[in-house]
Amino acid sequence: MSQLVKHHLFWPLCVLAVLLLFNLCYSPDFFSITIHDGHLYGSLIDILNFGAPLILVAIGMTLVVATKGIDLSVGSIVAISGAVACLSISKASDQNALGLILTSVLLAAGLSLVLGAWNGLLVSGAGIQPIIATLILMVAGRGIAQLVTGGQIITVTSTKYAYIGSGSLAALPFSIFVVALVLVIAVLLTRKTALGLFIEAVGCNPAASSMSGIRARWVILWVYVFCGLCAGIAGLLLSSNVSSADGNNAGLWYELDAILAVVIGGTSLNGGRFYLTGTVIGALIIQTLTTTIYMIGVPPEITLVVKAFVVLAVCLIQSDTFRAAIAARWKSRHYPAEKEVTRHVS
Amino acid sequence: MSLNRKFIPIVVTIVLFLVMFAAGSFRYTGFFSLQVLMNLLIDNAFLLITAVGMSFVILSGGIDLSVGSIIALSTMVSASLVQQQGWPPAVVIPLVLLMGALFGSIMGAIIHYFTIQPFIVTLAGMFLARGLCYVISIDTITIDNSFYTAIAQTRIPLPGGSFLSISAIIALVAVAVAIFTAHYTRFGRNVYALGGNEQSALLMGLPVGRTKVLVYTLSGLCSALAGVVFTFYMLSGYGLHAVGFELDTIAAVVIGGTLLTGGVGYVLGTFFGVLIQGVIQTIISFEGTLSSWWTKIVIGLLLFIFILLQRVLSSRRLTLKE
């Protein structure tokens, strides 16, 4: 039992379970899933579908955080990727041509790779602190996205493009398969090869890992490239789901939600350790929380207050000083000095 | 005369500002006037005040992401108390300032006593303040209180036919006080020491904890003051005021030559960092055809150049640190 409690997924899963249970009590048909036209419908499916972009971004962010870094530019990359894809589709005469969709998707994905590489080069090549290095793209990237869309919302009418974000495969939303694919690749690469170990080593101590023969700079560079790609794919899912790209608002606050998901999932911001499954659960918790708040009719903006307390609580629990303070208080409550003395006397 | 290495970033900032202003003057008629210069102060008074507080945080080696949200919360609290509850502004304004300072000090205390990264704590603060805005109201609250409109419309005439607003004067006073605090008080020296090396500061017997909490308190106070000034400027309270403002502020501080690892920089640099952002916006508005997103791209580019510059200049210092 104690081993179960100590497992890194225990608390995140508990929180998720409590949230789901609360929803079940509040609206009994929360868990009901109906089939309509060969698609599954239901709150749970919605959570998975709407949560897909966040899960993707958070997977990339997990690896970055594992190297003791942070990527603030993911929200901007989400916006740029969606904008580029929608722009190139909207310019074409036949928006449903398969070749066009593929080219647009590859173009957006390629661009997000380049943007990720830019971040990676600044961090590993120029040796700039990650938070600052990615701040540049966070500020400029939103401007680039607005430049691409001309400050407007670009709408596309392509049904093939819309399939990526809102189509369904084997009765499940297609976006879930995209997320699953990326997750499986990430897990295989990091847990079945030595790559995961390298990333953790770099996160613990880049200098020491360099000396032990790991090419720390390359590891850091590729981690940011992967994070950029994840954000780019998330941007595709997000823009295709609504068949439009909004340079101003797409992906706004994503970096913060993604970092929150990573932290809830048990990955420490101090680097050196990471849990991809934890992150996925963290992202699901955030999405469920948002859905719950919508469902019980609270203005959605109050999610921010709830999120604030969640961030703080999670960080306090992670803080050794805080845990020590609580433990001291707990002990002193149970064994006050006077009682201790009387016990010994008797 | 050889220039001291530590002054290079701030000199670059000032020269860049002068070059940009000169370039604007050559290109556009009507650009070269005292009033355009004064408008930089008038339109960026709140950015200036926030950036002053942020300078201290960054000098101490921290970061404060909550400033934009505290500005929004201040406008919201001011608007709802003055407009909906009918409180006198003389009570509301000190109350808002107190609230900002308290907010900052709580974040500072959590950062120091539980050793959690400033990034995360102020991120939570950012969510919290922004969320509290919506708890007050989801809609814009317009202010038509005579005191607020009077301050918003007052023009202080200057020789040469130009004028300043009361907000701009408040901002200039804030900069002056900050320069004095940073360079002529014990607190200022403690902040620099803390940013230089926290361990050393602790071993030297400096009050590290107190300084750290005070730095965030100051930043919260500055943000709340900026919020009050923003209320004069917008004459409304709204939960979406100043979204993304924390980044403009950090950018201003960095462009002003302050090292993000802490310990190196000048409040005067921040002053020019804000003016540079203002000049970019003015040039873009004079150009007319270019749109506002160019501001973001240019600021991002400048941020990049300054970070690289600092990296090159401080490479010796950093290798020592590592």
Image (cartoon, coloured by chain):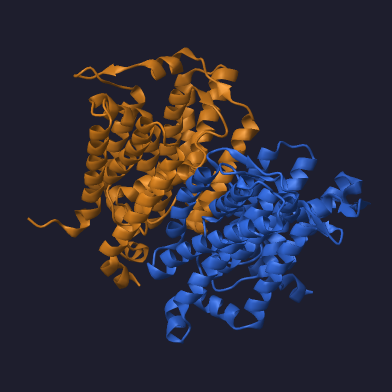
Chain colours: A blue, B orange
Describe residue A50's horizontal placement relative to residue B184 as left or right.
right
Q: Considering the image in quadrants, where does the N terminus of chain A appear?
A: bottom right
Residue B309 percent across, percent down from the top left: 29, 58
- Above or below: residue B310 compared with residue B319: above
Describe residue B320's horizontal placement relative to residue A35 as left or right.
left
Task: Please identify the residue farthest to the top as the structure is shown.
Answer: B146
Task: Please identify the residue farthest to the bottom as the structure is shown.
Answer: A212
Residue B306 percent across, percent down from the top left: 32, 54
How many callouts does the rendering have? 0
- Above or below: residue A300 compared with residue A194: above
Residue B233 percent across, percent down from the top left: 43, 25
Residue B10 percent across, percent down from the top left: 24, 49
* Residue sitting nearer the eye, A124 or B185: A124
From where the camera sits, is residue A306 visible?
Answer: yes
Quarter occupied by residue A111 = bottom right
Describe residue A320's horizontal placement relative to residue B193 as left or right.
right
Quarter occupied by residue A154 = top right
From where the camera sits, is residue B185 visible?
Answer: no
Quarter occupied by residue B15 = top left
Residue at image point 36% right, 66% down? B199
Residue at image point 50% right, 63% down? A114
